[in-house]
Amino acid sequence: MKGNAPRYSRINRKKMRNRSNQLLNMMIGLVVVLIIIVGASIIFGGNGEEAKVSDSGQEEIEQSSSVKNDSQREETNSNSADGGEGTSESSSDEGDEAGQSTSENEQSDESTSTDGEAGDDEESLTVPVVPDDDGIIVETIINSAWQPIGTTQTGVHESKYDLNSVDWEEKQKAISYATGHSVEELIYWKIKNGGGPQKSIGIVSTRDKSKKYRVFLEWVDEKGWKPVQMDILNTLDFEY
């Protein structure tokens, strides 16, 4: 038995080497297979990813182009809207300016008309200052707008200076009309003949004597007494 032990040992070692070689070959084969699989996956997987990237890039380009086109359309619409609004505002402004111009023209016409009326009134109201050496007259007024006051008298007119006569009362009213004061507000110092049968002169003052007047009257047939001149007096201290 002792003589056979070495042989068995060599056989066992040989078997073990063979097994080791087989295992190494199998491992090498597995490694080669893995390398092939990994390489193939890298090659084919890379092409797929590149295709995906290419497709994704194309989609992004198309989306970018679409967004750009939409943006351009929105800007165009916005510009069109702004242009319309600008045109509308311009038309509105032109309308407002035209309305303002028309209004100003109308106001100008009204102002001219008013000024013309005022001018007519001023022409009918002349207020000349008459020099007076005696210092009695402050101012003389001749108003072409004065009209006859009317009358209830009929027939041939006769100027009367009777305090109870209608003619006297109408003279008082004509004097009151010229001065702008009511009959009751005036003191009638004197009403006398004015140098003719149809002319009279009245000297009056306010109750407080702060205002004093001399009024010249003329008779108008069927229309009554008419003021033709009025002196604003500085004093009543003179012969009248």
Image: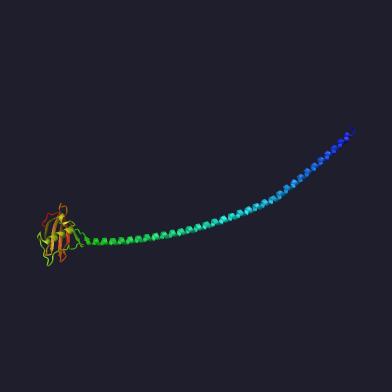
For the view shown, which residue lies furthest in the bottom direction? 155
Estimate the x, y position of residue 7 in percent, counting from the top left: 88, 36
For the C terminus, give its image quadrant. bottom left
In the rendered structure, the answer to whether residue 157 lies left or right of residue 61 reads left
Can residue 184 be seen here? Answer: yes
For the view shown, which residue lies furthest in the right direction? 3
Question: Is 151 rendered above or below residue 32?
Answer: below
- Depth order, front residue of 55/136: 55
Question: Is 41 rendered above or below residue 141?
Answer: above
Query: Residue 223's image quarter?
Result: bottom left
In the rendered structure, the answer to whether residue 200 lies left or right of residue 80 reads left
Residue drawn 40% across and 60% down? Answer: 95
Estimate the x, y position of residue 231 in percent, counting from the top left: 16, 58
- Depth order, front residue of 145/47: 47
Residue drawn 60% across and 55% down? Answer: 62
Query: Residue 149's image quarter?
Result: bottom left
In the rendered structure, the answer to whether residue 218 lies left or right of residue 7 reads left
- Depth order, front residue of 7/192: 7
For the N terminus, give its image quadrant. top right
- Count of numbered circles on the image: 0
Estimate the x, y position of residue 100 in percent, counting from the top left: 37, 59
Estimate the x, y position of residue 108 in percent, counting from the top left: 32, 61
For the view shown, which residue lies furthest in the front direction? 1
Can residue 135 be seen here? Answer: no
Residue drawn 85% across and 37% down? Answer: 12
In the rendered structure, the answer to whether residue 63 lies left or right of residue 195 reads right
Query: Residue 164's image quarter?
Result: bottom left
- Depth order, front residue of 10/181: 10
